[in-house]
Image (cartoon, grey):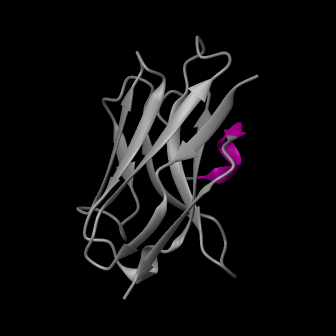
Amino acid sequence: QTQLVESGGGLVQAGGSLRLSCTVSGRTSSNYALAWFRQAPGKEREFVAAISWSGDTTYYADSVKGRLTISRDNAKNTMSLQMNSLKPEDTAVYYCAATRDYSGSSLPGLYDYWGQGTQVTVSS
């Protein structure tokens, strides 16, 4: 069973930065693409960014392009999301997710495993 645990959330002022991490454990010998999703109160879960198993392909939601950067370290079984120039509308619970698909996807239904989420709050 694969498990994902997020860390690094918190409270930051608009314009500030945070770095989220996701640690993957369990059957890590399997190849997984990884992604970040987020969910704000009263809203549906939305795609943020994804990275292929090898790390050579990344995808971003238009709303975060140029501000957020996804990366992974397969040797350490970790994935990160560097968030810069944060805005109040970035406030949400951020989830990491894993899929056996090599490239990843923006569709949450294609992901097999999910973390418990970490809260990010951006004050204005």
Q: Position of residue 64 (x, y in %)?
A: 34, 65
In which quadrant of the rendered view does residue 28 lie?
top right
Locate residue 40, reporting x and y percent.
Answer: 60, 75
Q: Residue at x 26, y 63 (%)?
A: 84
- Image height check: is 9 above or below 123? above
Find out whether residue 103 is within the magenta segment. no
Residue extending farthest bottom: 124
Q: Is residue 40 above or below residue 94?
A: below
Can you name the residue that lies furthest to the top here?
A: 29
Residue 110, image x, y percentages: 67, 43
Which quadrant does the N terminus fall into? top right
Between residues 76 and 47, which one lies in front from this camera angle?
76
Location of residue 89 with respect to 102 vertically, above or below: below
Identify the image quadrant of the C terminus: bottom left
Magenta segment, which residues?
Answer: 107-113
Residue 105 seen by the camera: no
Say which residue appears at 66% left-offset and 41% top-offset: 111
Task: State the image quarter where residue 54 is shown.
Answer: top left
Lateral position of residue 32 relative to residue 66, left or right: right
> Which residue is depicted at the point 25% across and 76% down?
15
Q: How many marks?
A: 0
Give yes or no for residue 112 being in the magenta stretch. Answer: yes
Determine whether 109 is above or below 43 in the image.
above
Q: Nearer the viewer, residue 114 or 108?
A: 114
The spot of residue 108 in percent (x, y) is 64, 52
